[in-house]
Image (cartoon, coloured by chain):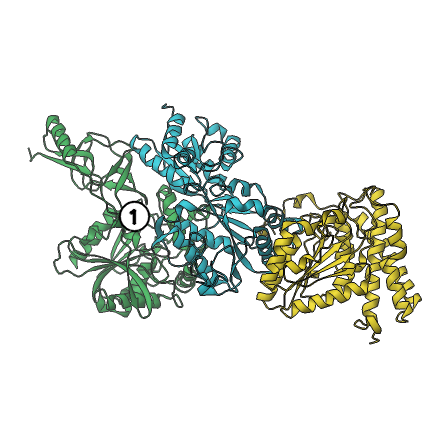
Chain colours: A yellow, B green, C cyan
Amino acid sequence: MDTAQGLIMKQSKTELLSAYRGMRTIRIFEDRMHVEFAGGGVPGFVHLYAGQEASAVGVCANLTDADILLNTHRAHGPAIARGADIFAVAKEIYCRGDGLCRGRGGSAHLHDVKSGLWGANSGVGSGVALGCGAALAARNNETGGIAVALVGDGGANQGVFLEAMNLASIWKLPVVIMVENNGYAEATAADYAIAGGDIHKRAAAFDMPGVVVDGHDYFAVYDAVLEAAERARAGHGPSLIEAKQRRYYGHFEGDAQSYRPKGEVEEYRKNRDCLKQFRQKVILDDLIATAELDAIDGEVGELIDRVYADAIAAPFPSEGEFMQYIYATDT
Amino acid sequence: MGDSNIIALMMPKWGMAMASGKVVDWLVDEGTQISVGEELLEIETEKTVNVLEAIDTGTLSRITAQSGDELPVGALLGVITQGGVSSKSVEAFILEFQERFVPEEVSEEVDTAPLNADVDGLSIAYRKYEAKNDQGKLPLLFIHGFGGNQDGWMYHAAELSENRTVYTIDLPGHGASEKEVADGTLPNLAKAVYGLMETVLEPRVHVVGHSLGAAVAVELAIQFPYQVASLTLISGAGAGTSVDKQYIEGFISANRRKQLKPYMQQLFVNSELATRSMVEDMLDAKRIEGVEECLRKISDAAIISLGDVDIRGNLTRLTMPIQIIWGKEDRVASIVEAKNLPASIENIIVDDAGHMVHIEAARKVNNLIAEFIKSV
Amino acid sequence: MSKKTYRQAINEGLVQEMHRDPSVILIGEDVAGGAGAGGDVDAWGGPMAVTKGLLSEFGPKRVLDTPISEAAYMGLAIGAAASGLRPVADLMFNDFIGVCFDQIVNQAAKYRYMYGGQDRIPLTVRTMIGAGLGISSQHSQCLYPVFSYFAGLKVVIPSGPYDAKGLLASAIRDDDPVIFCEHKMLYEMVEEVPDEPYAIPFGEAKFVREGEDVTIVALSRMVHIAMEAAESLAKEGIGCEVIDPRTTTPLDTESIIESVEETGRLVIVDEAGPRCGMASEIAAVVAEEAFSALNAPIIKVTPPYTPIPAAPNLEKLYIPDAGQVITAVHKVMGRE
């Protein structure tokens, strides 16, 4: 195994390649979704994750099969990063019958128990409470698993978020609270809505570690999550990570984003982009050759073409199954 | 011209818990000449609907209770006259009866919980009905059928305890007994009955068994012939009749009213006797943890496997007096084997009765039991 | 079999289910009472002492006192249920649903459906309902009609000790979220209750009393009010059939219709408010499916459309009583 060096020596080359592939997959998937949505044919709302890839991929690189990732409504990226079948992910966004949730959930509710991916959730902030439950069960059943709850800056202002932080702390639950602060709760700026501006500082009030990292830097996210996860696994309780980041598209597709400062997205794309940062680092450090990364880009491009063709061609759920899955006895 | 006489026809008391009954329908008209055993009216209790039969001969001169009337035990239903009695005397009789009548105070505790005894580490429930007039006669022990319990003897136990002590028992896995039947075989069930007799009852008894209880009674008599003074087998699965296996399975697995009702109806000729509350009581009993498993074990070991075995052979080996009572229309255990029984066995087939012949013709069965035991 | 109070029956049911299945845990405010307080660690067992003794018997890993954070611990309970535990979450008063409504109706109720049947949520929420203690509007409501609105939840309203124990066993063993509504005025009610565990299936109404003239459907504590009325009406020769649905989801409409088809008259007695409630629902179902059997309009006996007052005389006015039921029955019998 060729181990990477310096700052990034914690991960093997294979792991780094996989992280890059994950981020590129999400980027191309979301860029394509942007185009497809504008062309019609994608039902409901979609919230795109482009720009924030390092966050979900940096989290998931630290997770095992025993762990649970609590997704948010900006669900596509984390679902792909956690390893859910990307064909089923796309089909769920298109509300197809063999989508991840059989077309019952759609874009904002991607959920895949077998991948340890839970509850993309429209009730923002709830994932932290649900994650506490997964963590309690993991501890009671001694599975060794932890829960990592993704939550946005918007969700961080929910009462359930604060209540759950308190509960996680007094019970020392194996939970990592990953706040993806992308600067906007829908159209309202975090700078306006977060008292003091920093969500990680709230951790101190709940007697848990709280750190802030650049959410566009895969390595920074990876390291912060590694530390928090180790703490959780060791039985020392929860931690909070605030990963500051920006989305490249609107709150949902169709959002004209007139609330955003002119040039903000362009600036992030140009100077802060997670894929660019990653490439620079691994190429400069001579860990991975440009050609290898380019080859991945090509492969992912082809994959995404197939994923979309497959999803668009797939049938909607059978109407006869409309009432299935309400109760456990419905099978 | 014989003696003239006025007899009050009163609301009967069927079972300890019965405080009142409702007149469903009169089966005879006012003025009819009636004889002993004649069906007079249907009375509904909390548990079931039953027919009150005449115990006197005479004329049903007056009907004082109408269909739909809910009346306490002992209340006047009608007046039977013998010989020439003037209507004035009848009126006076009714007036006096109604003036004097005070419904019996029903204490909350009247439906006493059964007693429990430890029999070889197993808790077995039973009831004792002290003889009202103890003449030192051998006691009588009732054993209920599959899925039932000792409450099923509500029409019999108290009534037959006039001259002798009566016991009823809950078989293992049934009623208030422990929900544990080991392998569920007849010898095991019989052992529990014998164990109870040895521990707390009396060493020698007359035994009445219904259905599975009859089979247990036969097994008891084979193992402990001296302890069984006589055998009355009702709807005698014990005589090796073919049992409806579908009934057994359906009865065991039903856990809702709608599922269980048809099986309860199958027990009676008149399916209306399987009332909603009877079905609910049965469901309540079946729900108790362990009951279904016990029933299944007994079904496998003592019913299904023996259903096709003709155990008339066993009966010929027994020397105590035996009588068998069958409901002619039994739809659970066919009565085909009522034929070809040894001549020494009293063989009685009751018309218009099914598997629950002891409920459907309670008075008749009580009389049969009383007469039979008296003759022993 | 022995006589037990509603409180004892529920406590016994919890103990037996916790022995039966180690994945059953208890979560809520003061379910033990006294956590970290320096005095007794099992001080309360809930404000009505229903869960008294469970901490001592099962330990702090399975009996967890929470902060006053309904949203957090309800969400936690759902997450734990999705992970294979069988939490019994104690929502002390059902009125507090307001602070964890999202968790119960948007998370628990939707979890299985919205995620395409991947999960089972074996969660039981025990909660107190009902007026009668003079504790005003925020502690006295009957909100089972609210819970019953949401497909994905099951709702249980036991009216006595026997049903409480048997339905609780079914609730805990059920693989779906169940809201178990305990009427606070019933805790002292005594009834014969088997000592052994037993489970009463959901969706099976109980015919508490049979009668041929009027069907009275009564819910939770109102079963006893209806029975009081029925006994009195029997003396006038009016036979009331009193039906206790026992669960509002699933609702045994079949038994109600079967009875109405025999009696031709329906009175519904419900302590929940008059609008959008189970009384309205049952009336609608019967009007749709058994209209031709009706000999008189359906009458609902419910409290008025008002918050619940604390003053004893006003609260008494609020709660339906036997007199109102008798008046309603007279009306459907045409004996005004």
Quadrant, the N terminus of chain B? top left
Q: Provide residue B21's location: percent of width, then percent of height.
A: 27, 40
- Seen from this angle, which residue lies furthest bottom? A1
* Location of residue B197 (image quadrant): bottom left
Is residue C16 toward the left or the right of residue A208 in the image? left
Q: Is residue B316 visible?
A: yes
In the displayed structure, does residue B69 sit left or right of residue A201?
left
Q: Secondary structure at mark 1?
A: helix
Q: Residues within 10 Å of mark 1 (few under 14, many from 20)?
A: many
Quarter of the image for residue B125 reads bottom left
Q: Quadrant of the C terminus of chain B?
A: bottom left
Q: Chain of mark 1?
A: B
Using the rendered view, name the quadrant where residue B8 is placed.
top left
Total residue callouts: 1
Q: Which residue corresponds to the image point at 52% horizontal and 40% vertical from the top-left?
A: C145
Q: Is residue A299 visible?
A: no
Residue that appears at 63% across and 57% down: A165
Q: Give the x, y percent position of residue B258.
A: 45, 45
Q: Indicate whether C208 appears above or below C69.
A: above
Residue for badge 1: B359
Q: Is residue A193 above or below residue C62?
A: above
- The three-letter amino acid code for the residue at tag 1 is Ile
x then y, percent, for residue B287: 42, 54
In the rendered image, residue C82, in percent from the top left (x then y), is placed at: 61, 57
Which residue lies at the image location 79% right of the left edge and 52% below the top edge? A49
